[in-house]
Amino acid sequence: MRAEMVLELTMLSSKDWKLVQEIVGQLQFMADVSQADMFVDCLLASGDGAVVVAESHPSTGPSLYKMPVTGEIALEENEPGVLHCLLTGEAVMGARGISQEKVNIQQNVTPIKNGQGQTIAALIMERDITTIVEQEKHVEVLMETTEQLGETLFQQVMTENKLPELIHEGLLLFNHNGKITFANQRAQSMLLKLDHQNRLLGSQIDDLFFGRFAMEQIKQHGGILSEEVQCGNRFVTIKAVCLQRDDQKVGGILLLRDVTEMKEKEREIMIKSAVIKEIHHRVKNNLQTIASLLRLQMRRSNSEEVEKVFRESINRIMSISIIHEVLSQDGLDEVDCKEIFEYMSKGIVSSMHIHEHPIRVEVLGDSLYLNSRNASSLSLIINELVQNALNHAFQNTTKGVILITLKKAADYVEVTVLDNGAGFEYQPNITGNLGLEICHTLVQEDLNGEIVFKNTGKGTMVTIGFHMPEVDQDEL
């Protein structure tokens, strides 16, 4: 746009126009980088509009404009963001407007200021939002239609008392005076079971449940009130909703659901859970009693070999006892094997009385939840491997470390027991080690897995791999 025309239409000085022209020189670059139409507008001398003094359209993407708009006037009603920026000097992001070609646009408007801080022009980036506006219109129509449908349904119910009897909950409708105007068969049947003998239709909602769901009570709770009510040996959850139109109360809905059967099942589950926890507690106590008797018997022996056999048996019993102790606390049929291994390894090291060779056992990796049967088998296996390492791996060392690592990928579990001891070559066809024979039997028969022994040169690594057991339907 020519300088003479700009200076005539606006309040700009020649110096300000030169500053604007410097920005205009970069306008095509901005349009290409942003892939959007770019404009520079200046405020009219009258202050009631803006004139487009420069424009650039992206060569890297589509433009919204078919015809040039330089010299056209932008009115506040069509581009409010531009006028706001020019009048206040504030940037406006995401302002909506209508282009010269009647397209819905979104504008990001940035003020251009001179050395004195005065706003002399506006830099505008535009995007087409026609699709977004159309979607919003569809949503508005849908919301309006839904509101009209709901209002029509409510009016029909309130006037004709027609509502399908397909609702499983008891349904009561009451008007603005709290008068019950509709009750489905389910609601009438439920209230009879709750010893409400009076006629429902025409009675007041305040008369039900000692006035706990009166209109004023619902209003005090923000228009929605939900409670559980016990009448004798029956339990009912009640939800009350106040309906309003134009800030005026027009009535409300009361939904009743009989949860007596669910409460009874919850009570049965609680009783069963308590019984299961008590059983695990007693099993744990019995196992610990057996372990105590074996300790007494062990102390009466003068043979180191017999004492070793007793101690290994005690550790096996205590490894199972720990599982029942956890189950007695949680009441579940699954335990975290990582937690079990931590407790168990500390007990084994303590019971072995290895003072001349300080041994540290660490449990690393993921938590592993197994049912009580598989957890017991895996615990016995780990017990045997740790005991075996304590008995044989560290005789020629001053200290030792045993690492138990758990890994789980999808449905496959890998447990590794690694020590930094002397190491040994295991030959499964040569019998004589009861503990390792127990390991093989439990891995193959109980876990349906495999066990591999490896001499690393710096100790022994035992790897146990198996698939996660499927849920036994008989245990559910």
Image (tube, rainbow, N blue to C red):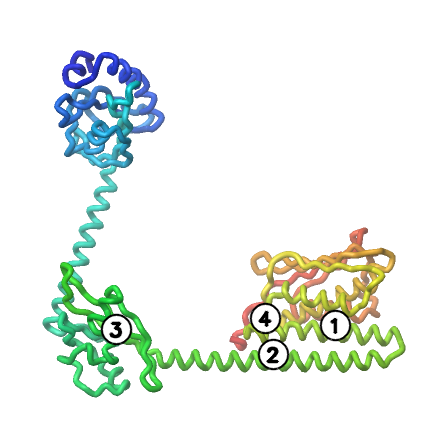
Measure the alpha-carbon separation of dots 2 and 3.
43 Å
In the picture, the disc for residue 280 is 2
Residue depth check, mark 3 versus mark 4: number of the one nearer the observer: 3
Image coords of residue 44 (percent x, y)? 16, 22
The mark nearer the N terminus, 1 or 2, is 2
Measure the alpha-carbon separation of dots 3 and 1.
59 Å
Given contact means CB atoms under 8 Å apart, are the residues at marks 3 and 1 in contact? Answer: no
Image coords of residue 13 (percent x, y)? 21, 14
Give the amino acid at mark 1: Asn
User: What residue is drawn where x is 83% and y is 72%?
Assistant: 308
Q: Indicate whether 178 appears above or below 404.
A: below
Q: Is residue 48 shown left or right of residue 283?
A: left
Name the outermost residue toward the front: 116
Give the amino acid at mark 2: His
User: What residue is drawn where x is 23% and y is 30%?
Assistant: 88
Tell me which corner region of the image, top left, top right, bottom left or bottom right, holds residue 337: bottom right
Given contact means CB atoms under 8 Å apart, are the residues at marks 4 and 2 in contact? Answer: no
The mark nearer the N terminus, 3 or 4, is 3
Q: Is residue 101 shown left or right of residue 212?
A: left
User: What residue is drawn where x is 31% and y is 20%?
Assistant: 28
Tell me which corner region of the image, top left, top right, bottom left or bottom right, holds residue 317: bottom right
In the picture, the disc for residue 371 is 4
Image coords of residue 54 (percent x, y)? 23, 20
Q: Which residue is mark 1?
A: 315
The mark nearer the N terminus, 4 or 2, is 2
Q: Which residue is mark 3?
A: 255
Q: Looking at the image, which is closer to me, 422 or 221?
A: 221
Name the outermost residue toward the right: 302
Tell me which corner region of the image, top left, top right, bottom left or bottom right, holds residue 156: bottom left
